Amino acid sequence: MEETIKKVMLTGDRPTGRLHIGHYVGSLRRRVELQNEGGFDEMFIMIADTQALTDNAGNPQKVRDNVIEVALDYLSAGIDPSKVTIFVQSRVPQLFEFTSYFMDLVTYSRLIRNPTIKSELDMRGFGESIPTGFLTYPISQASDILMFGTTIVPAGEDQMPMVEQAQEIAHKFNALYGEVFVEPKIMLPETEASRRLPGTDGKAKMSKSLGNCIYLSDDAKTVEKKVMSMFTDPTHLTITDPGHTEGNPVFIYLEAFAKDEHFAKYLPEYKNLDELKAHYERGGLGDVTVKRFLAKVLNDTLDPIRARRHELEKDIAGVYKILEEGSAKAREKAESIAIRARRAMGLNYFENRKLIEKQQKAYNKEHEAAAKLAAYLAQSKK
Ligand code: TRP
């Protein structure tokens, strides 16, 4: 009987800080939708502590402390642990076992061609002193993906090279040892605005080190303050000036968050974002009006998330319990695939009865031949 391929979703985040609204629109919001649509047989979300350590070896406390923060962010954003297995990467040893085997299938030149690795290297200025674990994390990430039989990886564009690496490894492994791994596909965010949210300062990316993030756990006042000081169109000097909405972070955020209901509720002079944009571009609409609106839209979206976080923060042990149980479930799943993969590679030393018997027979034959020779020699001496 042909085994039907299960629909399996897996994605994850490095625990290096609390999650921000860029994570939310880029991935987290979609995960919650996918969870609620129920189209997957199995769903996994991984807190990638081992990957976080690849460039934080000197600061394990930061990684440790952020595991619970990321878990709180997931749960408060609406991830339901009865539908999604949330687990901690380092608690699943099978991932590292297969990272070792997968390393044998990837060349050094292939690794350093990885565009995400390339740009991260430039950004961090590692040069030759790059930790080996950092250079090879795409292989480890391929293991994260492949060891769960993942069919879909919902993630941002920057994760495309990682998914491609996983596809290549699956293909190579299957060709060498037999069909074990599924080639995964990436699921990119749906709207352009969700693909990459710029920082509040207008820089291309929201990043903790740049201090240009709005966090899911920021309180309403903080969100308002951050929005009011956001970078907008630098050519829009007075209200009457025509403004640019393209590349304007305030409008990019609105694109990602504002719904028509928000207009009805807070800015009824406009039906929707198109009308607001048209006015801004014509001139006569001030940045303050637009920013005040954005702050309300964001706070509307974040209110229920903050409320849930507040409740969860009262039971930190309970949240760790969720991670512990999720990690046990993840180990079980990874081991079921590991068993098949080890078998395909012939590493199942203790269970392959046929091979053990064959080896025994070969030795028996040798011993018999030696005994015969010895008997013959003893005979001819007489
Ligand atoms: N590289 C991802 C990030 O930086 C985190 C991650 C680790 C991941 N393993 C994964 C994402 C597997 C998707 C699938 O956010």
Image (spheres, helix red, strand yellow):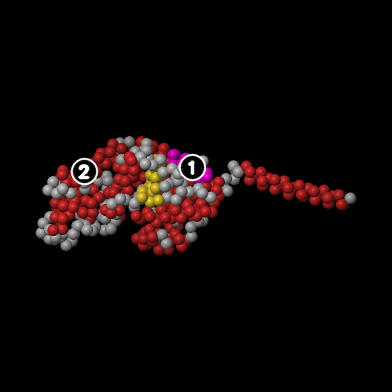
In the depicted view, which residue is nearer to us: 219 or 348?
348
Q: At which x and y percent is residue 311?
A: 28, 36
At mark 2, the secondary structure is: helix
Q: Which residues are magenta?
A: 328-340
At x 16% / y 46%, what residue is drawn?
A: 263
Q: Is residue 49 visible?
A: no
Q: How many labels were placed on the picture? A: 2
Pick the residue in front: 206 or 270.
Answer: 270
- Marks 2/1: CA–CA distance: 46 Å
Taking the spot 76% from the left edge, 47% from the top edge, the residue there is 368
Q: Is residue 317 magenta?
A: no
What residue is disc 2 on?
A: 300
Q: Is residue 148 left or right of residue 373?
A: left
Near-viewer residue (235 or 320): 235
The mark closer to the camera, 2 or 1, is 1
The residue at 43%/49% (across/down) is 145
Q: Residue at x 54, y 51 (%)?
A: 177
Which kind of residue does numbered mark 1 sit on? Glu
Measured from the top left, where is residue 348 in percent x and y? 57, 45
Residue under label 1, please give it: 3
Disc nearer the start of the sequence (2/1) = 1
Residue 382: give x, y in percent of width and height: 89, 50
| Dot 2 amino acid type | Asp
